[in-house]
Structures are given as C-alpha cells and as structure tokens.
Image (cartoon, helix red, strand yellow):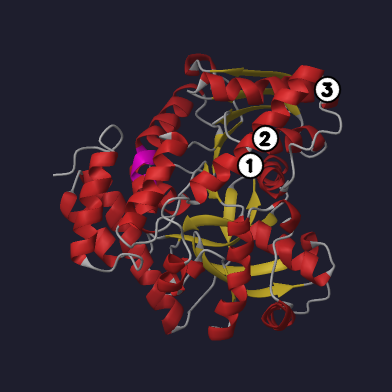
Amino acid sequence: MKEKLNVVIVGGGSTWCPGILKSLTKHQDILPLKRVVMYDTDADRQAVIGEFGKILFREEAPDVAFDYTTDKSRVYEDVDFVLCQIRTGGYDMRSTDEKIPLSMGLIGQETVGAGGMAYGIRSMTDMIEIVNDVRAQSPEAWIINYTNPAALVAYGLARVFPDEHRILNICDQPVNLLRSYGRLLGCASREFEPVYFGLNHFGWFTHIYDEAGRDLVPVIRDHVREHGFKPADAEQRDQSWLDTYAMVADMLHDFPDYLPNTYLQYYLYPKYKLAHLDPAYTRSDEVINSREKRVFAECRRVAQVGSAKGSSVVQNDAHGDMIVEVSSAIYRNTRQTFIVMVKNDGIIEGFPNDAMVEVAASVGVNGPQPYAVGKIEPFYYGLMTTQYSYERLAMEAYLEHSYEKALQALTLNRLVNDAKDAREVLDKLIEANKDYWPELK
C-alpha cells in the first residue's frame, strides 16, 4: 500500500469542487495525499476554483502539492485516483436540455426525460476520452465517476469498456437522503446500515437499520407522512430542492412500502411536476443565480484576502465526503458499505444482467462487492424494466449512431411516452446538440 496518493479531479471548474477540495484536506487521516491536480478544459472557470484551492491547501494541508491545469498531457501520470465530474456543454447546454422539452409540454430536467438523454449522449464522447487518457498513463488508477446523468454514463462506460474493473460510478443523492433521515431522527447517519435497490435516481430504501438492528424505515415513513421532509442542509438549499424533498410525503402516501429517491417524483407525478415548472426559468437558471454566483464570489473573496479560514464556500459536505470516503475504502480496504452502481449480474432476481443497478455494496481494495437484493415486487420491477430499456436504447443510439433507437428510447421514457412527441423533441435536441452528438442515421 502506497504511503501517500496522487489524485486528479477532472472538472476542476465545477461549483462542487471546493467541497471536494475541503474534504480532501480534512480527511488526510484516511486518504493521505502527495499531490492533487485539478484538470478542466475551461481555464477561466477553473482558475477561480484553483486559486481558492491553492490557499486552502497551503493553510490546511501544506505538505500536499496542489496545482491546476488545462494540459491533459501532464495530468494522469502516476495517478492513484481520478475523481471525475464533467459537464459537457456547460450550463448553456443544460439550459437547452431543460427548456426544449418544456417548450413542448414535456418535463425538462438535468438527468431525467429527454433533457437527461441529451446530456447523457453529450457526456459520453468526453467520458470515453477521459478513460482512454487515464489508462494510457496510469493503467491501475481508480476512476471514481459521478458525472451526470450517472445512470446513462455508467451503462455507456460498461458497454465501451467491458473489461474495466477500476471504474466506480457513484451518486451522492442516497447519502444526502441518509443524512436527511439522520436530521429527522436526531442521530448520525453514519450509524445507519442501508438496504437499497434501483437504478440511479430511480431507487428505494427498503430497510435502514440502526446500530441495535432496528429497522428505521417505518419510523421515517410515519414521520414524513405526518410532518413532511426536508434536506439535511435545508437552510442552504434552493426552493426547487425544498419542493423536491417535500414531494417524498406524497410518494409515501401513495406508495408506502419503501422510502423513495427524490427523483422518482418526476416519473410518478409528471403532470403535477410539469404544471409547477416554469419554462422560462428552469433549474439551470436557479443554479446560475444562486450556487454559481455564491461559490465563485466566495472563491474570489478568498483569493483576494489570501486566506480560506472561516470561508462559507462549502455548505454541503456530503458530496465531497462521500467521494473521499469511497476512495479511502478502496485504498485502506475497509469494506465499508456504500450505495454504488454495479452490473446487476443476478443481484436483482430476474432483472437483465447488464443493467447498471444502484445497490448497497461493501467497498474495498478490489472495488464493490454488492449485496444481493433478490426478488422485487411487480410494481417496482415494471418501473425499473421500462427505465432500463430506455437507458440501454439511449446508449445504443449513441454507440450505433442510430436515430431509430434514440426514438425508441424517448418513446419508452415515462416523461415522453408518445412517439410523435418523442420524434419532435428528438429532432429539436439533435439540432441543439449538433456540435456534441454523433450524427444519428
């Protein structure tokens, strides 16, 4: 085991990067570092975060070499972990993903529906390039990927790199939910032992055990149905996220068996959600005018005063902490339980083996060892089968340059669900993404 590690963050201009940097500095006891490098193709965005990072590491981890660059030729040499979070097309294309469907009376969202497919296809070319670049210089590096839409990206990478065993796809929404349950119950979520199944942004907690072995799901369900639900960091969240968490009470009223992932609101109540979305001001606008402005303003302030002490740039550390803790579990072989994406391979009985399911797994030096789920009830199986078929067809459309499969994917998607609408929105997305998508024939 190496004494100290070299880490690369791909997507160094992300507003989530300061939280990851902060987690890297504060968790030196579990993930000791020699070098951290941020890489991005957008020099201007990354420079703001990078200058904050230089000050942060100088003050909190001075023994760690820190730098940022746009030169990928020198990034991946002798790397142990690559933490990947890219946004191909930036916020301009995210806005397009959301507003084109909404202009047609369809839900536009970053990771679901037609907008999610647009983003997923757009991400794949860059993700494939990143994996190839990493492998050319560091064949044994672990790639911890949390690029959205993670469901499509995870399935696409598994198809393109079938023999890869050091790519781990993760998402922080289950962790955010566990932290929120902890706040609701007044206890630390680190004590929880979760049982979870589904696809990314499309899953359910069936059990959450405390240290005494008591299942907390019935307690949480009853509390949420009676008192509502808020995120653990509600005071820092935008209104759209508060509305999203509030919808959990509706889902539990109608489907009380399990605790749902918040993104299921779109699939279960598309008409209701559509009626409450503003086609002229979407989530991308909200992010640009809130988190984006706040993070960049605070990073610039830190650079100006020359100190990160007391900085408020990191308000939700769940994202960064999870990434560091997953990496540490691999490095130290702790076999700690996380909710991650893996090939089904019999985990969910009767479900396609090539599906990238999201389940609880023990994570150690050899990666995730998933816990079996077994048979699931018809309602959940039916929802997941349709969603899996959409994900598979969307990625096959990308890989085969197939217009027909893209049309099939959108027709199956519960947020489109009509072939004429699917064709119209697909044609508009093709035009909008002509600089990013392969030509679909």
Residue at horizontal 48 percent and vertical 79 percent from the top: 376
> Which of the labelled discs sits on residue 413, or is there none?
none
Q: Quarter holding the C terminus?
A: top left
Where is residue 179? Give x, y as percent.
73, 60
Compared to 66, does 256 lie above or below? below
Tag in front: 3 or 1: 1
Residue at horizontal 69 percent and vertical 70 percent from the top: 229
Residue at horizontal 53 percent and vertical 19 percent from the top: 43
* Secondary structure type for disc 2: helix
Name the one closer to the observer, 322 or 233: 233
Q: Are marks 3 and 1 in contact (CB under 8 Å)?
A: no
Q: Which residue is mark 1?
A: 291
**Residues in magenta, as a range:** 119-124
Q: Are marks 1 and 2 in contact (CB under 8 Å)?
A: yes
Residue at horizontal 72 percent and vertical 31 percent from the top: 298
> Which of the labelled discs sits on residue 307, or is there none?
3
Where is residue 324? Give x, y as percent.
69, 41
Q: Amino acid at mark 3?
A: Ser
> Which of the labelled discs sits on residue 295, or is there none?
2
User: From this viewpoint, is residue 136 visible?
Assistant: yes
CA–CA distance between discs 3 and 1?
21 Å
Q: Amino acid at mark 2?
A: Val
Q: Amino acid at mark 1?
A: Arg
